[in-house]
Image: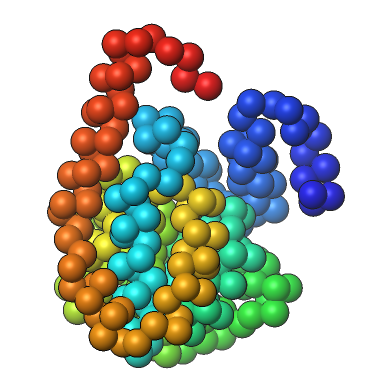
Amino acid sequence: MAEYEEFSIPKSHPRYHSLIFREKLARGFREGYVVPQGLIAHGRGEAFDYLIGECTTEPARKAMYAAVAFMLLAERPVISVNGNVAALVAEDIVKLAEKTNAAIEVNLFYRTSERVRKIAEIFRKLGVEVLGTDEDQLCTVPELLSERRKVSCRGIYVADVVLVALEDGDRTEALRKMGKKVIAIDLNPLSRTARTANITIVDNITRAVPEMIKIADELRLEPRDKLEKIVHSYNNEETLREIIEHICKRLTELARTQIKIL
Ligand code: ATP
Ligand code: MG
């Protein structure tokens, strides 16, 4: 892991992975494509990850299967990326896009041409041209007032399924109102995004995307009717309830036993 040597965090550190991800975000911030608000959002995500137990739960896995099946069935799936996503999992996003035939589009809450250009450059170095850049033809998502309403006319605007991660609630709502099916990766099961999406994967994006790549390998060769069955038997409300119950149960057990959390 030569890439991580620059961060000089000893591998033996009990929170090694968490610290690496923080360093990656801090580097993205220094390089000017992660915004300070993105760092705050990550901290909020980490807090929920602590409560979940920093692992992929069964309900989250179930949501991933439904999400990948949804993407494989879609005609025009798009993965929407922002600064945090680019800093944390750019390579894995490229792999997932390849396996699900999805386009990648940059969409930013705090859009500036410079940030868009830097994020596009990260993906270009990985061999992929992203949609939603200033050179791209941009259309408008109705009902959104911020710069996020600018989307690619060839991408999110005409997509049937959109995967969003670390996303704000009102954009998720606006995409739903446009008739898009929305898959969200969000550690907060109570957020508006989590409650508005069609499929919510309550997991850390750093665990979820690698897992979804494996699931895509598994489901790619399955017939459409099997994929349709996975999607139709999925219930997002029930999944969110299961995650909240998981957190309650875990905290009750911890309170009772006072075990070491780490
Ligand atoms: P909402 O607008 O949906 O009600 P919010 O305003 O709390 O939620 P935003 O800042 O709009 O949150 O979006 C960021 C979301 O991303 C948060 O819900 C946060 O928990 C989640 N998040 C942050 N880091 C990660 C991560 N590494 N993996 C998955 N989710 C994350
Ligand atoms: Mg928000």
Q: Is residue 64 above or below residue 5?
A: below
Q: Is residue 103 above or below residue 117?
A: below
Residue at left offset 61%, top offset 55%? 87
Front residue of 62/185: it is 62
Q: Is residue 248 above or below residue 191?
A: above
Front residue of 162/177: it is 162
The percent position of residue 54, horizontal first and vertical second, equals 46, 37
Indicate the quadrant where residue 170 lies: bottom left
The percent position of residue 229, horizontal first and vertical second, equals 22, 76
The percent position of residue 26, horizontal first and vertical second, equals 64, 42
The percent position of residue 261, horizontal first and vertical second, equals 47, 19
Front residue of 83/92: it is 92
Q: Is residue 61 left or right of residue 99?
A: left
- Asked whether residue 41 appears in the rendered view, the answer is no
Residue at left offset 26%, top offset 52%? 194
Residue at left offset 30%, top offset 19%? 253
Coloring scheme used: rainbow
